[in-house]
Image (cartoon, rainbow, N blue to C red):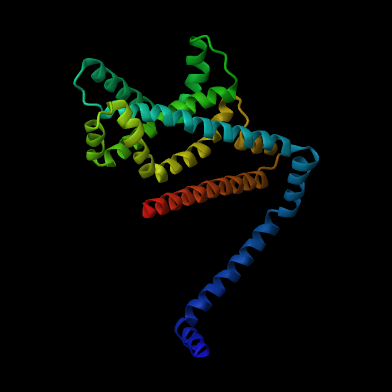
Amino acid sequence: MNEAKKKGFLRRHWIDILTVTVLAVLLCLLAYAIYERFQFAKKWDLFLEYFVENRGYNRLLTGLQNTAIIAVAGLLIGFVIGTLIAVIKVIPPYRKPTRYAQKFCTFYVAIFRGTPIVVQLLVGYYILFPIMGLTLPPVTACVVMFGLNSGAYISEIMRGGINSVDAGQLEAARAVGLPFSASMRKIVVPQAFKNILPTMGNEFIALVKETAVVGYVGAVDITKCFQDLGSNSYEYMIPYLVMALIYIVIVATIAFFVKWMERRLSRSDRRA
């Protein structure tokens, strides 16, 4: 029976199989031609010389560490700021302080969502911090600016998550005597976080990729490491290909853990 199925499959799809085989052969030939044309072996040896023998891996480790610090700390700061802004925006504007706070939050979000992160980084590091009399290390300055930027985006994400929670949850909490702040903190926000987890994962991935601009203020990240490596060796092809591969691995790892957390949360919901 299995043999008959195999023969039937081959008769139905022999053209597809042949096409895929021909394309695979052509891609292998193209890869080999590019390999020979651009002298990959020589470029690879030069890359290893600067990366291993000259201890370029130490700078890469520093870049990985700084990238992780900026992305993780920026996400945490952004989550706190974004949650605060989202809660302020959903408060009924019965009082003047609430209305003023909502207008300020709207202005804040418009500023940080309306300008590129590299512009915010340059303005913050070279203008705002010196005006305030602050002399921050490049990595610390990047953490602050990335956190402020992330807060603007997470505020909209969190606001959507809060609005996705059934309004009866908040009403029930208020009915049993919980104040508004406690109701939001203990009941609404935790449920909203579960709803926005995939989007938060995307925000974290975006932060990791956006750290590629921190070299503008002298911070060493993954991109800056490989840029310096290419400048020292006068060869950019292999360093940039390795850099792209590292970013792909990091993003794929984050996406895997976000999916894993989603599955865990969905299983807990089914058990409930």
| Residue name at image x 22 percent, y 35 percent | 171
| Residue name at image x 63 percent, y 67 percent | 29
Q: How many marks?
A: 0
Instruction: Give the side of residue 257 with respect to residue 83, left or right.
Output: right
228 lies above or below 262: above
Residue 199 appears at what percent x and percent y? Answer: 40, 43
Of 171 and 227, which appears nearest the observer?
Answer: 171
Residue sticking out furthest to the left: 94
Residue 233 appears at what percent x and percent y? Answer: 73, 39
237 lies above or below 104: below
**Is residue 116 at least partly visible in the picture?**
no
Instruction: Give the side of residue 14 with respect to residue 34, left or right.
Output: left
Residue 8 appears at what percent x and percent y? Answer: 46, 87
Of 242 and 7, which appears nearest the observer?
Answer: 7
| Residue name at image x 65 percent, y 58 percent | 34
Residue sticking out furthest to the right: 53
Instruction: Give the side of residue 176 with respect to residue 206, left or right.
Output: left
Of 2 and 169, which appears nearest the observer?
Answer: 169
Instruction: Give the side of residue 163 with respect to residue 21, left or right.
Output: left
**Is residue 41 at least partly visible in the picture?**
yes
Q: Quarter of the image holding residue 192?
A: top left
Of 53 and 155, which appears nearest the observer?
Answer: 155
Residue 115 appears at what percent x and percent y? Answer: 40, 28
| Residue name at image x 47 percent, y 28 percent | 77
237 lies above or below 160: below
